[in-house]
Image: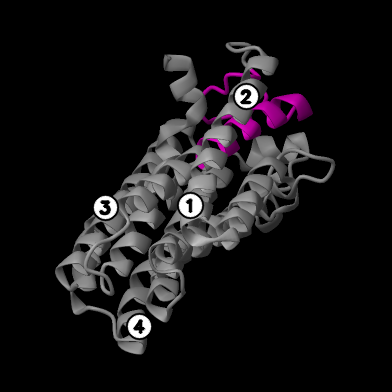
């Protein structure tokens, strides 16, 4: 179980949980009783799409030789030989299968559009480092995370409650997407040297270390700056400004990303960015519920 937990990469799971909380809490503004089944199904689907993507990435990177012994990140179970590649691949499809089951339930509740969105999310997860032309190797991973763990997940969670879209969840999804993307940026700035040697042309490899550091700082800043702008433009509840209480959590990971190159410090920054997203989303969810 410890090996499978390692393979699931729990530090990245706030990126799956946060958008569902925010999207559902935004829907509470307009309904007296939310669809609890839809909330739990969306949460399960999002978590298992994330886990499936992580497992697929573990398997595909090992197969392509991108995970070498000198990488600075946590041990990958496939490349290290801790778990047989075939077992990792089976676990990948089991995780995606759970997500599909949740998606079928949501489709029954909210229509075929959810099935299409779910299928696109799973396909994007598989093709991140798999397939003949993995887009994660072409510097497009950050765009995938912003779209699917920001815009799609927040607005999709809102949609399964009300079956229409609105400007408030769209605006809030930008902040969630920025912080989710920042998690991947930390991962890629940590691995920039080993990825370059392996021919994995992530955005960090293309931009270089310093520009990627600046990108991280910009994403974190944009997440906080976007909230008051969205509240003013879309007439959202002022209680959402509770997210500003999360600003003290920015300093430690930001300092590590901007000044350090060693694995332990940047692994800590990865965990710290995940924690920042978790607290940010919880405060945002609280503000939405209070303001409902």
At 30% across and 81% down in the image, what residue appears? Answer: 231
Q: Earlier in the sequence, mark 2 or mark 3?
A: 2
Identify the magenta region.
50-79
Mark nearer the viewer, 1 or 2? 1
Q: Is residue 286 left or right of residue 48?
A: left
The answer, for residue 272, to whether it is visible in the render is yes
Residue occupied by mark 4: 229
Residue 161 or residue 229, whichever sits in front: 161
C-alpha gap between disc 2 and disc 3: 33 Å
N-terminal label among 4 and 3: 4
- Using a 10 Å C-alpha cutoff, classify the residue at mark 2 as few (fewer than 14 neighbours), some (14 to 19) or many (20 or more): few
Kindly report the distance in space between the C-alpha atoms of the residues bearing marks 4 and 1: 32 Å
Secondary structure state at the residue bearing disc 4: helix
Instruction: Tell me the element at label 2.
Output: loop
Q: Position of residue 217 (x, y in %)?
A: 44, 62
Among numbered discs 1 and 3, the one appearing first in the sequence: 1
Residue 142 % position (x, y)? 59, 56
Which quadrant of the figure has residue 65?
top right
Q: Quadrant of residue 166?
A: bottom left
So how many labels did they put on this image? 4
Q: Any mark on residue 106, and which?
A: 1
Comparing marks 2 and 4, which lies closer to the viewer? 4
Q: Are marks 4 and 3 in contact (CB under 8 Å)?
A: no
Q: Which residue is mark 2?
A: 70
Residue 131 is inside the magenta segment = no
Q: Is residue 64 within the magenta segment?
A: yes
Q: Label 3 belongs to which residue?
A: 279
Dot 1: within a 10 Å radius of its alpha carbon, few (fewer than 14), some, or many (20 or more) residues?
many
Q: Nearer the viewer, mark 2 or mark 3?
A: 3
């Amino acid at each position: 179980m410890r090996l499978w937990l390692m393979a699931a990469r729990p530090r990245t799971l706030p990126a799956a949980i946060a958008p569902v909380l925010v999207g559902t809490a935004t829907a509470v503004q307009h309904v007296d009783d939310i669809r609890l089944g839809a909330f739990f199904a969306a949460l399960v689907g999002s978590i298992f799409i994330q886990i499936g993507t992580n497992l697929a990435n573990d398997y595909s990177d090992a197969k392509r030789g991108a995970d070498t012994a000198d990488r600075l990140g946590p041990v990958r179970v496939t490349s290290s030989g801790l778990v047989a590649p075939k077992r990792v691949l089976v676990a990948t499809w089991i995780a995606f299968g759970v997500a599909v089951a949740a998606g079928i339930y949501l489709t029954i509740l909210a229509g075929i559009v959810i099935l299409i969105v779910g299928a696109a999310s799973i396909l994007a997860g598989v093709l991140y480092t798999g397939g003949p032309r993995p887009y994660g190797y072409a510097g497009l991973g950050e765009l995938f995370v912003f779209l699917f763990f920001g815009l799609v997940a927040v607005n999709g969670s809102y949609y399964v409650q009300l079956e229409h879209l609105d400007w408030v969840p769209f605006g809030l999804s930008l902040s969630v997407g920025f912080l989710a993307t920042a998690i991947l940026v930390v991962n890629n700035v940590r691995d920039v040297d080993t990825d370059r040697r392996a021919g994995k042309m992530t955005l960090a490899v293309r931009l270089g270390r310093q520009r990627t550091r600046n990108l991280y700082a910009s994403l974190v800043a944009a997440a906080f700056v976007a909230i008051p702008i969205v509240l003013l433009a879309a007439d959202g509840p002022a209680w959402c400004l509770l997210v500003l209480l999360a600003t003290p959590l920015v300093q430690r990971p930001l300092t590590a990303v901007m000044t350090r190159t060693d694995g332990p410090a940047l692994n800590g920054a990865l965990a710290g960015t995940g924690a920042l997203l978790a607290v940010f989303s919880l405060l945002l969810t609280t503000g939405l519920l209070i303001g409902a």
